[in-house]
């Protein structure tokens, strides 16, 4: 067995980590996670940590879930992969049926990809080609939101709105219309109406994250806003794409965030929690209207020319089926709603910390903003690295979290129990207090 010392050495010598300043990382002692137990991650020294951000927002029922483990083992004994180009497999077909059964009414067709950004690319290309086939080739622009995030491929970045992540790549991107973020939902709606009134003939679709802009800092929209957004899209004949990669599978207290308003989008994008946090898989789900538009004779070239080598991978689909079975068998959403009430009460305690400027939450998604002087709106400097310092302190408390700048993100597995949740929030509270008061 390879020693932990060698694992760390290989990591520092050969791995380029995502969203990580490697100059900083190379001077640190890497944390090696090699085991797990429910909502806990276990390092190479046997230390346990609450998985406070669900391993980057993907884990749903905890780690080492016996039902998902068994489903993957059973599938791998049959076949690990077979293409979905022109043929099918049982797992992909069964999962598609399950996804349609739980999706908003009116969604009928499932297109598989490997991750959220890929599924967003599918949605954008579908919307573009849909209008092209209908003879409206000028409807080729997209509307997105400031502080929105839909992945890191170029199409997804073109409809993203986070300058820190996206400004570097502007010369490579296609032009989109950008409207206000969820900081002020009423302004978002007014700006959308004004834009579509003037430009709807050139706009294919609006894409947004329903209710919570996750990577944008856990910005939360006002109740009922999504219904208004849908009305405006229908009024001006543009497609509505809802990116539920981060908000789906119980995160907000419903299976999907759009269920809060009973909204059916034209295109729904799913990822992250689809397999319970086990394997890469995403889905772009759409209506019969959009699907049927692509039907035609071979020489009409109406087919959707897009695909992935691992589309509908049987292993991933088997994990996803087991994930959805657990939702039903263990009444995951019902249980989550009870824990969400506890979470909301726990978050109120953070208002007593003098360097906490605001707290936003929806379901089991929360963002806590830290500022040097909230009363005078004075932020910490980038070099202060307050968010990272808080996360490093939390690690000492047995909690793994990751910040978005100076916003502390809390997004535990949906299955988390009340006792575990309270340990998580109290550890983060203590860490924020320790770090910010020492920095004053």
Image (cartoon, grey):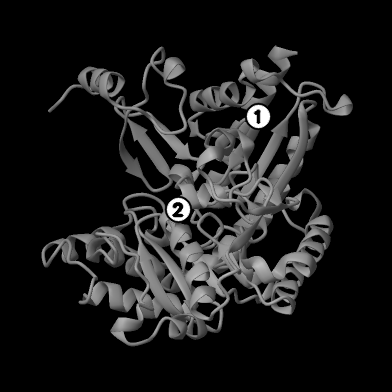
196 vs 141, left or right, is right
Q: Position of residue 229 (x, y in %)?
A: 73, 68
295 vs 1, left or right, is right
- The quarter of the picture where the C terminus appears is top right
Q: Circle 1 sits in a helix, a strand or a loop, which is it?
A: loop
Q: Position of residue 280 (x, y in %)?
A: 34, 54
The residue singled out by tag 2 in the image is 117
Q: Position of residue 78 (x, y in %)?
A: 11, 67
Q: Circle 2 sits in a helix, a strand or a loop, which is it?
A: helix
Q: Is residue 349 above or below residue 377?
A: below
What residue lies at 66% left-to-right and 19% top-to-bottom?
Answer: 434
> Considering depth in this image, is 409 or 430 the residue closer to the camera?
409
Asked if marks 2 and 1 touch (Cβ < 8 Å), the reply is: no
Q: Classify residue 373 by image quadrant.
A: top right
* Label ID, residue 406: 1
> Considering depth in this image, is 180 or 21 the residue closer to the camera?
180
Disc 2 vs disc 1: which is toward the camera? 2
* Label ID, residue 106: none
- The quarter of the picture where the N terminus appears is top left
What's the distance in space between the residues labelled 2 and 1, CA to CA?
A: 25 Å
What residue lies at 44% left-to-right and 86% top-to-bottom?
Answer: 292
Q: Is residue 362 above or below residue 6?
A: below
What residue lies at 42% left-to-right and 20% top-to-bottom?
Answer: 22
């Amino acid at each position: 067995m390879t020693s932990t010392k060698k694992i760390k050495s290989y990591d520092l010598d050969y791995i380029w980590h995502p969203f990580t300043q490697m100059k900083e990382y190379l001077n640190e002692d890497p944390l090696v996670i090699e085991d797990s137990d429910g909502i806990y991650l276990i390092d190479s020294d046997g230390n346990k940590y609450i998985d406070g951000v669900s391993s980057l927002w993907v884990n749903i029922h905890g780690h080492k879930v016996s039902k998902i483990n068994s489903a993957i083992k059973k599938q791998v004994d049959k076949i690990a992969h077979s293409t979905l180009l022109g043929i099918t497999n049982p797992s992909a077909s069964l999962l598609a049926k399950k996804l349609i059964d739980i999706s908003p009414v009116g969604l009928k067709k499932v297109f598989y990809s490997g991750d959220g950004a890929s599924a967003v690319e599918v949605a954008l290309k579908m919307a573009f080609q849909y209008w092209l086939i209908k003879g409206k080739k000028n409807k080729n622009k997209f509307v997105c939101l400031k502080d929105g995030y839909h992945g890191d491929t170029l199409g997804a970045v073109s409809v993203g709105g986070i300058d820190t992540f996206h400004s570097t790549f502007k010369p490579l991107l296609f032009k989109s219309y950008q409207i206000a973020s969820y900081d002020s939902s009423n302004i978002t709606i007014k700006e959308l109406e004004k834009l579509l009134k003037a430009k709807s003939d050139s706009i294919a679709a609006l894409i947004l994250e329903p209710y919570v802009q996750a990577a944008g800092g856990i910005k939360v929209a006002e109740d009922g806003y999504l219904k208004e957004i849908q009305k405006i899209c229908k009024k001006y004949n543009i497609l509505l794409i809802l990116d539920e990669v981060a908000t789906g599978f119980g995160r907000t207290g419903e299976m999907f965030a759009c269920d809060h308003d009973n909204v059916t989008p034209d295109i729904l994008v799913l990822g992250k929690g689809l397999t319970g946090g086990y394997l890469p898989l995403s889905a772009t789900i759409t209506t019969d209207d959009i699907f049927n538009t692509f039907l035609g004779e071979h020489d009409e070239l109406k087919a959707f020319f897009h695909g992935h080598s691992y589309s509908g991978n049987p292993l991933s689909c088997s994990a996803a089926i087991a994930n959805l079975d657990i939702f039903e068998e263990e009444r995951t959403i019902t249980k989550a709603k009870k824990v969400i009430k506890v979470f909301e009460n726990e978050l109120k305690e953070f208002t007593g910390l003098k360097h906490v400027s605001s707290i936003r939450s929806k379901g089991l998604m929360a963002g806590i903003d830290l500022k040097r002087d909230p009363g005078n709106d004075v932020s910490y400097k980038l070099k202060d690295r307050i968010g990272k310092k808080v996360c490093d302190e939390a690690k000492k408390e047995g909690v793994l979290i990751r910040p978005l700048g100076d916003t502390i993100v809390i997004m535990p597995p949906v299955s988390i129990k009340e006792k575990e949740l309270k340990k998580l929030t109290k550890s983060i509270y203590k860490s924020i207090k320790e770090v910010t008061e020492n920095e004053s």
